[in-house]
Amino acid sequence: MKQQRHILVIGGGLAGLAAARYLQAAGATVTLLEREREVGGRARTALVDGYAFELGAEFLASFYTRTLALVGELGLHQHLQRIPRSSAILRDGQLYPLWPNLRLAFTHLIRSQQKLPLTYLLASLARHRTRLDLYAFHKAYPIDDQDVSSYALAHFSRELLEYVLQPPIAGIFYWTPERTSRALLLLVLKAGFSRPTGLQLFTLRGGLGGLARALAGDLQVRLGVEVRTITPQTEGGYTLHVQDEDGVATLEADGIVIATTATAVPHLLPWLDHERRRFFEAIVYSQTANLALGTRTPLPQATYGLLFPRRETPFLASATLQTVKDPTTAPAGRAALCLHLSGPATAALRQQDDDTLARLMLADLRRLLPMYDPTPGLEVQRLYRCPEALPEFNVGHFQRLKAFADGAIEQGQIVFAGDYLGGPFIEGALVSGEQAAQRLLQRMA
Ligand SMILES: Cc1cc2nc3c(=O)[nH]c(=O)nc-3n(C[C@H](O)[C@H](O)[C@H](O)COP(=O)(O)OP(=O)(O)OC[C@H]3O[C@@H](n4cnc5c(N)ncnc54)[C@H](O)[C@@H]3O)c2cc1C
């Protein structure tokens, strides 16, 4: 690549930050543009009256090889801590620990005879293992043929679907099994069970927002700059029309990484042809609302993540005890808790105001698990809406990723990054950013 050519990265989420960091390390001149007043996107931590609440991402998983390496490279390893007592699923008023390892076979959450067909799942994992590549999701396109609900009903049982598969899908991704490809299920299971210790969860002390801040470290970042449209110049390069606090301006770039959510792309590139526009428009995001609560009321400390099957409630999908994950997220003697509304409930209730939603979520928690009621000593309550939570990896998405990997989408000196390409979690966002940076360097060579 010629020296002095200027690259703009649009979006300061983890994908954009990883791309910018990679490009800068390769010697490029890079500026990152972020429309918000801080970096992190869907992986930010809010500090409110001595409490720290995750606004999006809550944990890192032990199979996030690249993320965990980056934590070391950024000098954050002393802040990395394992989350104990990771999760439990509610059934008939009782919490069943969800061991993310082979001890799952002994859970009383479902009846013993329901567990036998799980051997089919293990056989499927073995049969498709070469297609299940966490760093190349598109390889799984041949098994992107059935949603998780149809797959579970065909091979397992409704009970297993409703009490083992649906709660994590809803509580972590805010999707439904009907809108999840079985390819995604097999990919995540293979990654999760690939280690002898099983799946372990980690966080960064003080909140995962620290990862984005560390990544931004020595990058040139402009906050509060929203890119409106990008126009190709006839002589090569691009003009970006941006809005910042001083008004409307234009910027020039030789190469661009677009690291926004997929839904933003057709607005940024109004000149996209029909096929490419359809690619981005087909990507749908789940939604949720996060009710962050700080309380003097002591709450049970037995488990970090509580998953609520839709059979038990149509409202809450999950609750996370922030202070079990990391005691520094609340002042001494206090507890911090986040409640997450299910994807379908968030869509159905989107017209309701914040107070109504908060009341409904708290009432649901009191009904489901009265001992977790934070209201007697409640001192902080904030509702954060997340209209674009996680990109659905529904049936058809792996076919789209195959077309993307085959080069049918990117053109010129513009590349794309984001969790909709790399996988619906932090690891996917970071890796997609680094992969996009590599492709741009090749295109500009
Ligand atoms: C509620 C929730 C819980 C989650 N829990 C976990 C978890 O526990 N573990 C996990 O691994 N993952 C989790 N995730 C997923 C994880 O947060 C995301 O996969 C990841 O952060 C996505 O990063 P990204 O860079 O692809 O996108 P984003 O973080 O969305 O970044 C895109 C950025 O682009 C900016 N932008 C958009 N348009 C423009 C524009 N026109 N001009 C300038 N800037 C623009 C946005 O402001 C944003 O900062 C969770 C997500 C949510 C929402």
Image (cartoon, rainbow, N blue to C red):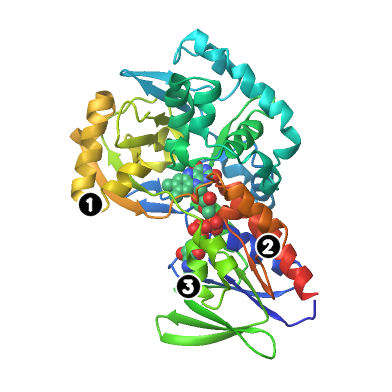
Image: 70 above or below 372: below
Q: How crowded is mark 1: few (under 14 residues within 10 Å), some or many (20 or more)?
A: some
The answer to whether residue 34 of the structure is visible from this angle is no
Residue 355 at x, y percent in the picture = 19, 49
Residue 249 at x, y percent in the picture = 48, 87
What is the C-alpha distance between the residues marked 3 and 1?
A: 29 Å
- The residue pinned by badge 1 equals 354
Q: Which residue lies furthest to the bottom in this view?
A: 235
Amino acid type of the residue tagged 1 in the rendering? Asp
Amino acid type of the residue tagged 2 in the rendering? Ala
What is the C-alpha distance between the residues marked 3 and 2?
A: 20 Å
Amino acid type of the residue tagged 3 in the rendering? His
Q: Residues within 10 Å of mark 2 (few under 14, many from 20)?
A: many
- CB under 8 Å between discs 1 and 2: no
Residue 343 at x, y percent in the picture = 37, 44
Q: What element carries label 3?
A: helix
Label 3 vs 2, first from the N-terminus: 3
- Disc 1 within 8 angstroms of ligand 1 (CB): no
Find residue 267 and name its label. 3
Q: In screen coordinates, is 419 left or right of 27? A: left
Q: Which of 95 and 328 is in front in this view?
A: 95
- Image quarter of residue 239: bottom right
**Mark 3 vs mark 2: in front:** 3
- The residue pinned by badge 2 equals 436
- CB under 8 Å between discs 3 and 1: no
Q: Nearer the viewer, residue 173 or 323?
A: 173
- Image quarter of residue 291: top left
- Disc 3 within 8 angstroms of ligand 1 (CB): yes
Q: Residue furthest top?
A: 112
Q: In screen coordinates, is 127 left or right of 419? A: right
Q: In screen coordinates, is 186 left or right of 157? A: right
